[in-house]
């Protein structure tokens, strides 16, 4: 990934945030991780012209105020934002959520595994995948 | 009055009428002819009397003729010799010839000889009609003109009628000239009459009309005869006698005598009466026998069938037994009546049946509408319950989701943090702390899996997929590939598997769990798993057999309980819900699951699924709820 662009993480659970942070560090990914606790904040960030558009968004589906699906809808509806790949983070692996996410245009999904190592592997896979198919701005 | 009696009366009346008619015909037709016959006979008898009388007269005439046409008599007229007179003319002669009178007159009328005697008293009789002096030439007994001339017949005298014969006296050679008249006579007294009557024979009575000796009764007869101008008059007397009257003329052809013949009718009458009576009797007998025959025939043809019909009609009416049918095989009106009655009863039965059916169906319809109303109510209630169930279901799902998410999240946090602590500070902690951290991590993982297992268990069987026809022959290989059996384990399908109706997920989970268990616990270097199916008592009995470590009998029940997993190899996670989920699913389909095993040899897990009515029942239920 282009190290210039940040990775937007939309996640409310602090341990999960730490997990992502640690994973990125372990993988030596240099992109900046921007974290917003919920969908609204994330939208604000995205809407803010001052901020760089992230190279991809890690989106937690279960969030207060605005859950992930709603955020996804809005983002994908926005002309400026919809190009950004969104990876959906989900706890359950329940098909409904995944199918719905893909329908709404998610680029991929990730199950929040209890195994940290697995989580790191998944991040790596995402990174590889997105690097090879990076869209220009 | 019953038909039978009426018929008897009718027949009796007919017979009586016939008898009466017959009798009347006898009386008015036969009798008169018989009477006529009788009369004819009477007349004939009278004719015989007349004939007899005439014969007497004729005999007398013959005698007279003989005496008259004789030379002695011829000479005697002239010379009146005493030889002749003593020989022929005396009393002896009279008596010998039964004569009362001999007279000989000459041509002038002078009486040459004349004697009238009563033969019984021997008295001489004087008759004015036959005087002793010379007779007038106009005397009826005289005046013979020719040789053959004769005057015979009845001559009325003052002493009663007389048979008389008068002949001219001529020679023996019947030559004239006539010298005189020879006259003989016999009184027609009772004996003479009796003699005449005896010839017939019959009772004969004679009266002289002129002298008024005719009794009063007979005088009417005279008038009758004179008026009717018939020769005879017949009448009945009270004492069973038939009187036949006739008139006998004298020598001058004037009716002089009234003759009456009495004919006994006794036998005749009796005979007729008997004949009529016997005829009547025979007719009556014939009539009665005809009547009997008629009765029997009528009874057989008409009365008995009608009685039968009547009693049948009454029985049907009384007993309301509509099923009885009159079996009358006749082609006449009675048969028609019976048939029509049968048909009528049949129609009545049908109408009644229809009425009953209608009322039934009406009743049924009422019932049906009531039932329908009830059903709708129940259906509404069911719908409500179903809706509530759906709500509960949804709540459970939400709960499960929430539980899984909200419980797992902090758990994940704990695990991650503990993980980092261990990896960051391993060297700082010391062995004990390290081990404790490891144990901590293990416990956390265990909890995670338990939650996962609990979630899976609660979710098991509650999918919302429709039941479909699953061909296990196609599906099972898929499931087998999903569980990824290692190379040392061969999985075979023993026989043809059926097509069952179920949710795909369910049967998949059951087989998946059983197969993965078999793989998980396999302790032999060369392992096999055999999947089979047999039909038993309306169920499909599936089997998953392996040659694994086997299970102790005391664990047979336990292993199906939640979270009861036997120790496994550390490579696999055993949440202990696999069999529990399988059991839940199998029992959802009203099946059973159990295990048979020998420790060290292997285990066979069996489960049953009922055969196909399941689908049909469900479909019906679904369909009915929507109405």
Image (cartoon, rainbow, N blue to C red):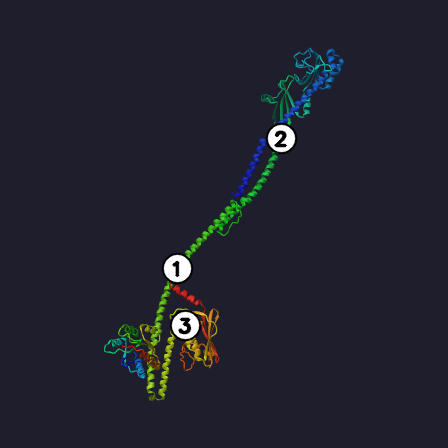
Find residue B161 and report its horizontal and vertical position in percent.
Answer: 66, 18
Instruction: State which mark lies toward you, 1 or 2.
Output: 1
**What secondary structure is marked by label 2?**
helix
Instruction: State which mark lies toward you, 3 or 2.
Output: 3
Q: Quadrant of residue B566?
A: bottom left
Q: Is residue A74 above or below residue B114?
A: below
The residues tagged by marks 3 and 2 sit, at their Cα atoms, a distance apart of 132 Å
Q: Which residue is under mark 2?
A: B269
Who is closer to the viewer here, B427 or A29? A29
Q: Residues within 10 Å of mark 2 (few under 14, many from 20)?
A: some
| Residue at image coords 34%, 86% | B423
Side of B84 where B319 appears, left or right:
left
Q: Chain of mark 3?
A: B
Find residue B491 and report its horizontal and vertical position in percent.
Answer: 46, 77
Q: Quadrant of residue B23?
A: top right
Q: Residue furthest right?
A: B83
Q: Which of the numbered marks, if any, corresponds to residue B370?
A: 1
The residues tagged by marks 1 and 2 sit, at their Cα atoms, a distance apart of 102 Å
Q: Which of the numbered marks, if any, corresponds to residue B506?
A: 3
Instruction: State which mark lies toward you, 1 or 3.
Output: 3
């Amino acid at each position: 990934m282009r190290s210039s662009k940040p990775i937007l993480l939309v996640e409310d659970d602090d341990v999960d945030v730490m997990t992502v942070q640690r994973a990125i560090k372990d993988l030596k990914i240099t992109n900046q991780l921007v974290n917003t606790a919920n969908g609204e904040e994330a939208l604000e960030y995205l809407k803010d012209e001052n901020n760089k558009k992230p190279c991809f968004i890690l989106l937690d589906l279960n969030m207060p105020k605005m859950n992930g699906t709603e955020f996804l809808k809005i983002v994908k509806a926005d002309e400026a934002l919809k190009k950004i790949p969104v990876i959906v983070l989900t706890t359950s692996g329940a098909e409904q959520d995944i199918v719905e996410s893909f329908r709404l245009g998610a680029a991929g999904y990730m199950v929040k595994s209890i195994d940290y190592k697995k989580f790191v592997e998944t991040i790596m896979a995402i990174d590889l995948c997105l690097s090879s198919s990076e869209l220009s701005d | 009055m019953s038909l039978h009696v009426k018929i008897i009366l009718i027949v009796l009346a007919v017979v009586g009428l016939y008898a009466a008619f017959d009798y009347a015909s006898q009386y008015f037709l036969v009798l008169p002819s018989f009477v006529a016959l009788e009369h004819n006979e009477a007349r004939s008898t009278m004719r015989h009397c007349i004939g007899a009388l005439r014969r007497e007269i004729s005999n007398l005439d013959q005698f007279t003729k003989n005496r008259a046409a004789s030379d002695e008599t011829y000479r005697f007229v002239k010379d009146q010799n005493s030889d002749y007179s003593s020989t022929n003319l005396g009393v002896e002669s009279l008596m010998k010839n039964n004569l009362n009178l001999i007279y000989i007159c000459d041509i002038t009328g002078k009486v040459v000889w004349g004697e009238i005697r009563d033969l019984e008293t021997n008295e001489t009789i004087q008759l004015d009609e036959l005087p002793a002096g010379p007779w007038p030439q106009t005397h009826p007994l005289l005046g013979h003109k020719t040789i053959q001339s004769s005057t015979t017949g009845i001559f009325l005298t003052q002493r009663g009628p007389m048979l008389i014969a008068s002949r001219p006296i001529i020679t023996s050679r019947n030559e004239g000239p006539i010298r005189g008249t020879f006259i003989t006579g016999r009184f027609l007294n009772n004996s003479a009459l009796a003699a005449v009557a005896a010839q017939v024979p019959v009772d004969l009575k004679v009266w002289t009309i002129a002298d008024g000796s005719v009794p009063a009764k007979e005088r009417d007869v005279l008038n009758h005869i004179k008026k009717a101008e018939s020769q005879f008059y017949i009448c009945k007397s009270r004492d069973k006698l038939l009187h036949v009257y006739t008139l006998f003329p004298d020598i001058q052809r004037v009716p002089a005598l009234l003759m009456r013949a009495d004919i006994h009718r006794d036998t005749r009458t009796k005979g007729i009466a008997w004949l009529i009576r016997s005829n009547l009797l025979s007719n009556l007998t014939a009539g009665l026998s005809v009547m009997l025959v008629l009765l029997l025939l009528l009874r057989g043809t008409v009365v008995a069938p009608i009685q039968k019909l009547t009693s049948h009609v009454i029985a049907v009416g009384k007993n309301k037994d509509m099923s009885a049918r009159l079996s009358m095989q006749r082609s006449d009106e009675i048969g028609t009546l019976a048939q029509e009655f049968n048909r009528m009863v049949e129609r009545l039965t049908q109408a009644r049946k229809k009425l009953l059916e209608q009322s039934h169906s009406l009743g049924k319809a009422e019932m049906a509408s009531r039932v329908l109303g009830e059903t709708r109510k129940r259906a509404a209630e069911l719908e409500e319950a179903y809706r509530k169930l759906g709500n509960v279901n949804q709540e459970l799902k939400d709960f499960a989701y929430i539980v899984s998410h909200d419980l797992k999240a902090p758990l994940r946090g704990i695990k991650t943090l503990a993980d980092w602590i261990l990896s960051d500070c391993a060297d700082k902690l010391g062995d004990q702390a390290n081990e404790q951290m490891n144990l901590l991590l293990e416990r956390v993982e265990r909890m995670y899996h338990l939650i996962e297992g609990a979630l899976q268990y609660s979710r098991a069987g509650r999918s919302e997929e429709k039941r479909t026809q699953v061909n296990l022959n196609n599906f099972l290989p898929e499931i087998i590939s999903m569980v990824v059996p290692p190379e040392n384990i061969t999985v075979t399908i023993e026989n043809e598997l059926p097509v069952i109706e179920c949710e795909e997920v369910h049967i998949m989970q059951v087989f998946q769990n059983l197969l993965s268990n078999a793989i998980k616990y396999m302790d032999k270097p060369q392992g096999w798993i055999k999947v089979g199916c047999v039909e038993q008592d309306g169920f499909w009995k599936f089997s998953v057999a392996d040659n694994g470590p086997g299970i102790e009998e005391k664990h047979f029940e336990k292993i199906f309980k939640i979270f009861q997993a036997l120790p496994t190899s550390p490579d696999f996670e055993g949440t202990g819900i696999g069999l529990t989920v399988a059991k839940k699913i199998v029992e959802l389909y009203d099946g059973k699951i159990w295990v048979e095993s020998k420790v060290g040899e292997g285990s066979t897990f069996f489960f049953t699924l009922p055969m196909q009515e399941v689908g049909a029942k469900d479909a019906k239920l679904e369909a009915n709820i929507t109405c």
